[in-house]
Amino acid sequence: MSTAADHTEARLRQLHVTDDEIIAELTDGRTISVPLAWSWRLSDATPEARQNFQILGDGQGAHWPDVDEDISVAGMLSGMPAPRPQKSPAKDAA
């Protein structure tokens, strides 16, 4: 039986970013992936910026400094895509 505690115990060992997916190899042997589209910042980033990441702490997630994006293992496991910010309606200058 899976519990919320399972998500907090999972740790990132390695990460791969393709044109379509974010693929995480976890320390417990699992490999999980989410669509790249779940991160609008990474979707909009250059391939070079997508490959420039740092694993955070003892593997809780990853950070992409070029696009200021953070993705946690818990977020990947629970299916939490990053929402794209809504554009503010243009204000009249009158």
Image (cartoon, helix red, strand yellow):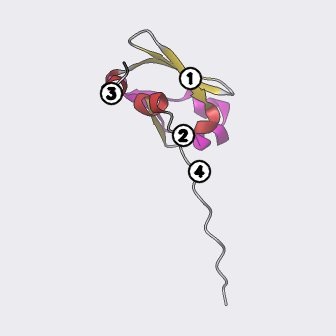
Give the CA distance from mark 1 to mark 4.
20 Å
Secondary structure type for disc 3: helix
Q: Which residue is mark 4?
A: 84
Secondary structure type for disc 4: loop
85 or 17: which is nearer to us?
Answer: 85
Q: Which residue is mark 3?
A: 8
**Identity of the amino acid at label 3?**
Thr
Task: Give the foreground label among 3 and 4.
Answer: 3
Give the CA distance from mark 4 to mark 2.
9 Å
**Identity of the amino acid at label 1?**
Ser
Circle number at residue 33: 1
Q: Is residue 93 magenta?
A: no
On the image, which quarter does residue 37 sit in? top right
Q: Which residue is mark 2?
A: 81
**Identity of the amino acid at label 2?**
Pro
Question: Looking at this rendering, what residue extends furthest in the front direction?
Answer: 1
The image position of residue 80, as x and y in percent, is 50, 38
**Identity of the amino acid at label 4?**
Arg
Write down the region rendered in magenta: 39-65
Give the CA distance from mark 2 to mark 1.
12 Å
On the image, which quarter does residue 48 sit in? top right
Q: Is residue 55 magenta?
A: yes
Give the CA distance from mark 3 to mark 1.
17 Å
